[in-house]
Amino acid sequence: MTDPLMDGDGEGVLRQVYDAAGPYLASLADRPVLDPAAASLPRDLAGDLPDKGEGAAAAVRRLLHVGTGAATHSAGPRFFHFVIGGVTPAALAGDWTASLLDQNAAFRNSSAFATEVETVALRWLRELFGLPEGYGGALVASATFANFTGLGTATHWWGERHGADIAANGLAGLPRMPVLSSGYVHASSRKALQMLGHGRESVEVFARDPVGRVDLAALERRLAGLRAPAVVIANAGEVNAGDFDPVADLADLAERYGAWLHVDGAFGLFAALSPRTAGLVAGIERADSIACDAHKWLNVPYESGFAFLREPARLAVAFGMPGAAYLPGAGAALDGGPGGTAPHPGYALLGPESSRRARSLPIWATLAAYGRSGHQAMVERHLDLAQHLAALVDAAPDLERLADVPLCIVCFRVRPAGVPEQELDDLNRQVGAALLADGRVFAGTTVYGGRVALRPAIVNWRTTESDITAFVEIVRSLIP
């Protein structure tokens, strides 16, 4: 029996992908985000597992045909749904390199190269956001995992204050960990608390209005009455309108009452890159932990997030493995982690994942290619585009903006003349569904302050003013 893996044309298969990449990337500016006519294409990949494969060239040819036709073209300039960036050319090349080298970035022993590049990438990210020199962290798969990392470390800190070793013995016998936040707290923070065993409903919300703005006085009263260690979550970039909790004020409260301050900065941390918006994250340098996504505004491929800690040695306490005969154990992480004296043992001991992709390579590549000034220019261009979108909404007689635009999200709804207020929510749901079905541009609905609205987010490096203008024109064309 022959081995088809040994007889294949590996270089030819890779050439197929390379040859498809150029035309596909060049088409993104004019492609619809989703082509309704291609909805049935994925069926071409179904069927029973073949006994005898069709060969690499045929399989990849089929995959490329279906993928370039039926995929959601979220790398293009007219995808405004969720908060999803594109992929810069350097980051894409870095990601291809990561796949080519196929490193397990778990330990220095599995890839000293990946360990060193991750160390550089983390330092460059820290410098990009202006965080103090002592901060350290690890790359993770997403903002959810970054929140998990920060809140997981906070959990071990909280256990110490109760005289408990949570790494060894868990949460049994301990009271519930108090977690306080504004109404801006994101579902990913709740999911992280759920995975950590605290429960997604453990967050105590202190909001002074239906939108969710923080009630600082009520939150302080709760902290003062606890007389026990607590965790405060500050939200840097709320997902419906891009608003921010007052990070500096929450940092003051955390210091005053001995609380842990975790900042969820999934995309809002990038406000630090522009002098126009840096004030929104003032005080973040006082946070105990910070979560952020790279596959949002840094415009690198999925899956890529990162977490920073003011005391990075705490990562090893929370995530150091118990060890095995062939693996470095928790002690190695304590000795060789950020600030340690021994050679860095590897980032598997400083975060939730063990086997891990070398996701540092696209981050390193895009930062090396475009530098601080290039990424600042991108952020500031997006700030301008958000203001342009806001101006178009304000000028349209059948649209209504619902919030200020501090960053890159514009929250608005359709409001044609003569439509009663009680019918506007259903109308906006209808327009939102039509927008996604149409596919020329993408943006979904949300509920903001009790009203259904659209909330396009502008974080893709390819987006231009013409894309914003087209977005507004298409939305208005779909109003029945």
Image: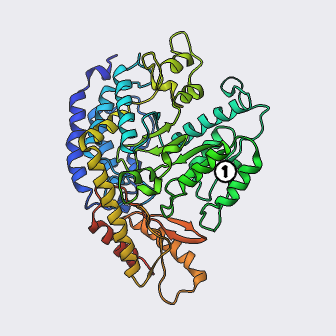
Image quadrant where residue 472 sits: bottom left
- Please tell me which residue is depicted at 30% across the width and 44% down the height of the picture: 64
Mark 1 crowd level (few <14, some 14–19, many ≥20, 10 Å Cα) = many
- Please tell me which residue is depicted at 66% across the width and 50% down the height of the picture: 180
Q: Is residue 411 above or below residue 355?
A: below
**Closer to the camera, 126 or 20?**
126
Under tag 1, what secondary structure? strand
**Residue found at the far right of this picture:** 173
The quadrant the N terminus occupies is: top left
- Please tell me which residue is depicted at 70% across the width and 59% down the height of the picture: 218
Q: Amino acid at mark 1?
A: Leu
Q: Is residue 211 above or below residue 122?
A: below
The quadrant the C terminus occupies is: bottom left
**Residue found at the far bottom of this picture:** 418
Q: Position of residue 228 (x, y in %)?
A: 74, 41
Q: Position of residue 143 (x, y in %)?
A: 49, 44
Please say whether residue 461 is visible from this viewpoint: no
Q: Position of residue 293 (x, y in %)?
A: 44, 45
Q: Which residue is mark 1?
A: 180
In the image, 115: left or right of 227?
left
